[in-house]
Amino acid sequence: MSDFVPSLDRLALLARARPDLLAGSLARYQEQEGLSDSQLAARLGCEVEALARLALCERPRPAPYFAGDAERIAGYIHADLKGLVQVLRAIEVREALSGSVDAKRAAGPTLLAARDYDEDEADGEDQGISATGDADEPENG
Amino acid sequence: MKATGEELSFHRRILARNDPIAFAELADTLYASLVQQVCKRAGVHADQTLVEEAVGQALLDYHDRPGSYNPERASLRSYLVMAAHRDFLNAAAKERRAQAHQVSLFELTSQGRDIVNEREEVESHAQAGELLAMIDEIFPDAKERRIVTLILNKVQSHTPYVQVLGIAHLPIEEQRKQVQLVKNRLTRRMRRRLSGM
């Protein structure tokens, strides 16, 4: 046991299954870009050892919190803010295009707005506003 | 003992869900010492991979459901140690049950092909206990031993293999492909060893 050194890398590996943390998205980005750990760290402007800590960070919240969250993460892992934001935005775009669960979660407010619009149209029809006017009224006789 | 001031601060930040680095900082602070504490509780012969996995899961479960922890009742550290130790005991018991099952070399198959054809020759060479010792020798890596145990117990679902290999983040088709590659590789290694008997 004296030779055994626990590694945050192993925790970061387990964290890939948690959609709220960056671990899974970062791993997919790294694989898609064909980057080694050193290359990813260079892109982010941080040390390789910081990647495990980055993986355990929460995904930045959407605007208006995104900039503040990204800055907080960059400060924590001593990364270049611009590099980090570029990587985070690239991850968002890829996930949005692939229609992943993470992307749908990130796009939540937009989807709610679309649903409201549909409900308003449906409400208009229920109020009897139709092109046929009095066609359904019973005849007097 | 209740939560310390530092633990309470972490707990509030994680509950609020408005600080992206709160969980990472907590993990960085506690992870190594949690693993060492659970290792101590688990005993010198404990599988350290299982211990680390149990600690990792306990931390991640706390991240998902921080409301399950009551800072008035216990320190966060002792809460996590208890949760991880419980998970470790369950995982270790499962592993022991899997290894205790008597297996025949004729059950070791890959895509329906038998590895060993001469039943009498094999049975004259190995009882189950000797077989398990042989597996320990052929597969010194704990992960590979767990995969071989799953194969020997004819586990068809690919989910347990995926969990052992830690590839849940890959697309389903890629998971299946990786699982099959690993199963084939380990089966070939076993076949080579058996053919040399």
Image (tube, coloured by chain):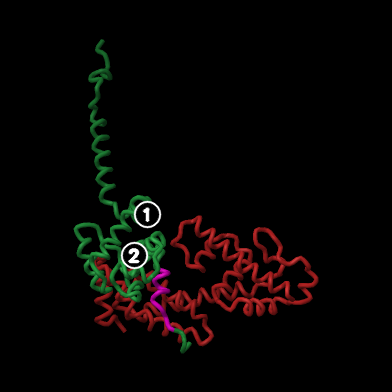
Chain colours: A green, B red
Q: Is residue A8 magenta?
A: yes
Earlier residue among tags 2 and 1: 2
Q: Estimate the x, y position of residue A93 in percent, counting from the top left.
A: 31, 54
For disc 1, the neighbor class at 10 Å (few under 14, some 14 to 19, many from 20) is few
Q: Estimate the x, y position of residue A76 in percent, counting from the top left.
A: 25, 73
Q: Is residue B81 magenta?
A: no
- Which residue is located at x 65 percent, y 72 percent? B101
Give the numbered dot on residue A22: 2
Above/below status of B120 relative to B170: below
Q: Amino acid at mark 1?
A: Val
Q: How many marks?
A: 2
Residue nearest the observer in this picture, B117 or B80? B117
Q: CB of mark 2 within 8 Å of CB of mark 1?
A: no
Residue nearest the observer in this picture, A127 or B146? B146
Q: Estimate the x, y position of residue A82 in percent, counting from the top left.
A: 23, 64
Q: Indicate the quadrant containing the C terminus of chain B: top left, top right, bottom left or bottom right.
A: bottom right
Q: Give, as a single range, the part of the protein colored magenta.
A: A5-14
Query: Is label 2 or label 1 in front?
Result: 2
Location of mark 1 (residue): A101
Q: Amino acid at mark 2?
A: Leu
Q: Is residue B191 left or right of residue B70?
A: right
Q: Indicate the quadrant containing the N terminus of chain B: top left, top right, bottom left or bottom right.
A: bottom left
Above/below status of B160 relative to A99: below
Which corner quadrant of the image does residue B7 belong to? Answer: bottom left
Q: Which element type, helix, strand or loop, lies under badge 1?
A: helix
Per the picture, the main secondary structure of the magenta-coloured stretch is: helix
Which corner quadrant of the image does residue B118 belong to? Answer: bottom right
Q: State the residue lying farthest toward the right.
A: B120
